[in-house]
Image (tube, coloured by chain):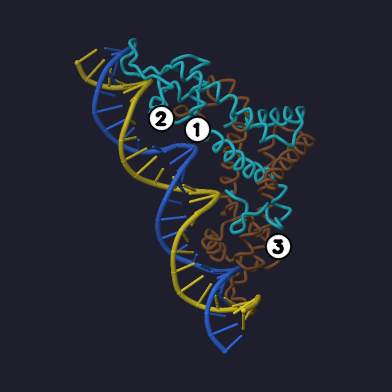
Chain colours: A brown, B cyan, C blue, D yellow
Amino acid sequence: MTRAEAADVPDADAPQTPGRLRRLASRLLSQLTMRSDRLINEGLARADARKWHYAVLASLEEYGPGSQAALSRRTGIYRSDMVGLLNELTERGLVERAPDPDDRRRNTITISSRGRRQLRRLDKVLDELHDELLAPLNPAERDQFTRLLTRLLDHHTGTS
Amino acid sequence: MTRAEAADVPDADAPQTPGRLRRLASRLLSQLTMRSDRLINEGLARADARKWHYAVLASLEEYGPGSQAALSRRTGIYRSDMVGLLNELTERGLVERAPDPDDRRRNTITISSRGRRQLRRLDKVLDELHDELLAPLNPAERDQFTRLLTRLLDHHTGTS
DNA sequence: CGTACATCGTTAGTGGGACTAACGCAATCG
DNA sequence: CGATTGCGTTAGTCCCACTAACGATGTACG
């Protein structure tokens, strides 16, 4: 809803946001997510990565090589966008594209050892970033928060 | 991160999302927010409104008339976008634009009685939508959730 | 065995949200 | 006054989710 906080002043949640808005869960979610996204994107950018890099690398390590379409399904990244993403990853030598001998329609994507190393790094980076994101919460609260989010998301992805 | 759920199949959170991704608070936030935004946007669209309509109307009712820039600050909507938004609201007769006698540089925006009625309607609509959004949580949990969100957001808007 | 259908990789393009840049104008300040 | 500031406004950028369409395979089955 807002990338920074106000339209003019790069200042907090505005002097006087109507209470109605301040309590709206949907709005809180939007705003927090905006911050969170910025935090994560910037943090990953410092490591020459994007969140999708992480998603693909993690998926490859966890489930092994796969076609682009398979990766799309696993990560939720549109196959349309997968192309460019895999270009970025191959450029960096984190991943290898090779034609599938069994089905010549597809490319098989494999994670490289450099990719594995990068994945470890990103794990660490993300850990730190989440520490920052969840800073005000103690471990129990972080857990609670994650669990509530998961329950809500599950509800809406099932019912979708 | 994903508008629907997967790239191809309009199906749940994918057969097999890597555990690393599934537990990432930032990702949970993004995904849930996407759902939430869709839910809210669609719900409001059915009432011929957008979330910004609500923000502006609420701000006007709570703090009284104001210049466009003031509204921007209150609602967090960029003043660049305020123009078109106010056009929509005046078209619908929910708001009135008049030159400010005290400072002839600005326009004063006032909520109309029709605007007030619409605000009530939207309050109700949003209530219902939030009921849907938070469906899996009991009242105490909803409260907890909102409080956690607020704390996190406050932290990051202060430290921004 | 051949034809209809499905899958995949790919390119392009849409639409929306969050911003930035720049301008011109009027008002207030030094 | 002349400089500066606040406003309203237009235009345009960037990123992301998503759709459309296509050619090249493969697969199913009548």
Residue found 51% across the figure and 16% down from its top: B61
Label 3 to label 2: alpha-carbon separation: 50 Å
Residue found 65% across the figure and 68% down from its top: A66
Mark in front: 3 vs 1: 1
- In the image, farthest residue toward the top: B102
Question: x%, y% of residue B50?
Answer: 50, 32
Q: Read off the residue under disc 3.
A: A61
Label 2 to label 1: alpha-carbon separation: 10 Å
Q: Is residue A29 above or below residue B120?
A: below
**How many residues crowd mark 1 within 10 Å: few (<14), some (14–19), many (20+)?**
some
Q: Secondary structure at mark 3?
A: helix
Q: Read off the residue under disc 2.
A: B88
In this orientation, which residue lies closer to the viewer: B12 or A88? B12
Q: Is residue B101 above or below residue B11?
A: above
Question: x%, y% of residue B52?
Answer: 49, 30
**How many residues crowd mark 2 within 10 Å: few (<14), some (14–19), many (20+)?**
some
Mark in front: 3 vs 2: 2
Q: Read off the residue under disc 1.
A: B50
| Marks 2, 1 in one chain | yes
Identify the image quadrant of residue A119. Answer: bottom right
Q: Secondary structure at mark 2?
A: helix
Query: Which amino acid does the dot numbered 3 rest on?
Result: Glu
Query: Which amino acid does the dot numbered 2 rest on?
Result: Glu
| Marks 3, 1 in one chain | no
Residue found 65% across the figure and 43% down from its top: B26
Which mark, by number, is residue B140?
A: none
In this orientation, which residue lies closer to the viewer: A96 or A93? A96
Pointer 2 and pointer 1: residues touching (CB < 8 Å)?
yes
Question: x%, y% of residue A157?
Answer: 68, 47
Identify the image quadrant of residue C7. Answer: bottom right
Query: Which amino acid does the dot numbered 1 rest on?
Result: Arg
The chain containing the residue under callout 3 comes to A
